[in-house]
Amino acid sequence: MSYINIVKEFIIETFLFGDDRNLQNDTSFLNNGIIDSTGMLELITFLEETFSISIMDDELIPKNLDSINNVNAFITKKLGNDTET
Amino acid sequence: MDFNKDILKIDCEKESRRIEQFIRKQVFENFRKKGIVIGISGGIDSAVVAALSVRAIGADKVIGLILPEKESNPISAQYAELLIKKLAIYSETVEITPMLESFNTYQKREIIVKKYFPSFNSMWKFRLTMPQNLLEKDRFNISSLEVQNPEGNIESKRLSSKDYLGMVAATDIKQRVRMIMLYYFAEKNNYIVTGTTNVPETMQGFFVKHGDGGVDIEPISHLYKTQVYQMAEFLQVPKEIINRTPSPDTYSFVVSDKELYFCLPYDILDLLLYAKKNKISIDKVGEALNLEKEQIERVFRDFDYKKQATNHLRQLPPVLNIL
């Protein structure tokens, strides 16, 4: 299952005020000024609440959270791991 | 352009004269006021600006205010008094705790802390900190709430975005109340208020808009922190102040500038900020500071993120028509 649409919708509504500005799935949120560190905290809170997961401090890295694709892969892995355990 | 570890060494005597001239010109010619009010925090930046102000316009035209509150480190007021005595300037101490209580500043913050640490009480201390491993790995500048109980045990939790913003907004009231007091004294004496912000604070947005950033002049905003230290030595600022670890002194659990925001020691931070600003090649920087390319690029990205996140602090209110 892909979480791309859920994440994309949240990013567009929350940080781009409804204007998608041609946001691509591999666009870096930080390098393109879409999300700052406070925004990242907002994204983390959204992911934890929406997917009922806990994101650990050592998981707070760009590889997991700095684009729609990265978030999708991270959530997929987290939910898969949660199911296994 | 050359780059080495000594690139930020300055001729303090010459620099002092330049800043003194700037202060005189601003006070008497630009603003046409009679003197300067400065908040003396007990830290190095305000000590240097106060000393420069005295040299520029005379001790009789400088007022130093000590503005402690119940969570201030007691050493701050002691060091502030030490400086005031040395500079022989008029000073007043105004305890701002009642004003902060009238805004429910402490209560607002305690409600947030108790959500995460229900056993928290007034005997505990707390602070915000950022991950300190900037040179080691890619990570985000996400603050954690750290508490210390009376037994000295430390625990840390990440705040939600809403609680983080609430904590910062409540804490920033402290600097804004201080700004109100500085302007009260400035207006009643027909003086101006001087700021004490330096290069890393200005570039990276480590100040409160309309708080410590709410001033009439900024005499050291072109000096890197290590240059402020050089000036402090030249101006014979008390050793206790020079040797003190820089801290904003806004949380009950003492936190340094590095732990709260910069994540790098000032000597490296200054040189990397200088290198980025002056477009020094990564190879040259790496060679001079013995850092890997990856580390430098990571720090440069961090500079960009912090600068971008704090752009609004440096902006004047946009207007439709310039009058």
Image (tube, rainbow, N blue to C red):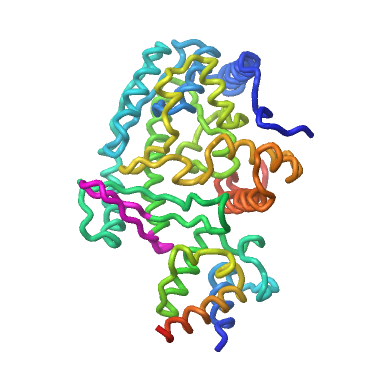
x, y (%) of residue B168? 41, 51
Query: Vertically, is B180 above or below B32?
Result: below
Residue at image coords 48%, 84%: A80
Instruction: Looking at the picture, tell me which residue is in the foreground, B46 or A85.
Output: A85
Residue sitting at the far right: B1
At horizontal 23% and vertical 54% (from top left) the residue drawn is B120
Residue B265 x/y as whole percent: 52, 39
Q: Relative to B20, say whether B225 is above or below.
A: below
Image-based side of B42 in relation to B18, left or right: left
Measuring from the top left, give residue A12's x and y in whole percent: 59, 73
The front one of B14 and B31 is B14
Magenta region includes residue B247: no
Magenta stretch in the rendered image: B145-163
Quarter of the N terminus of chain B within the rendering: top right
* Residue B232 locus on image (x, y percent): 51, 20
Q: Quadrant of the C terminus of chain B?
A: top right
Which of the two residues, B204 or B39, is positioned nearer the viewer here? B204
Q: Is residue B224 left or right of residue B284?
A: left
As drawn, which residue projects farthest toward the bottom? A1
Residue B150 is inside the magenta segment: yes
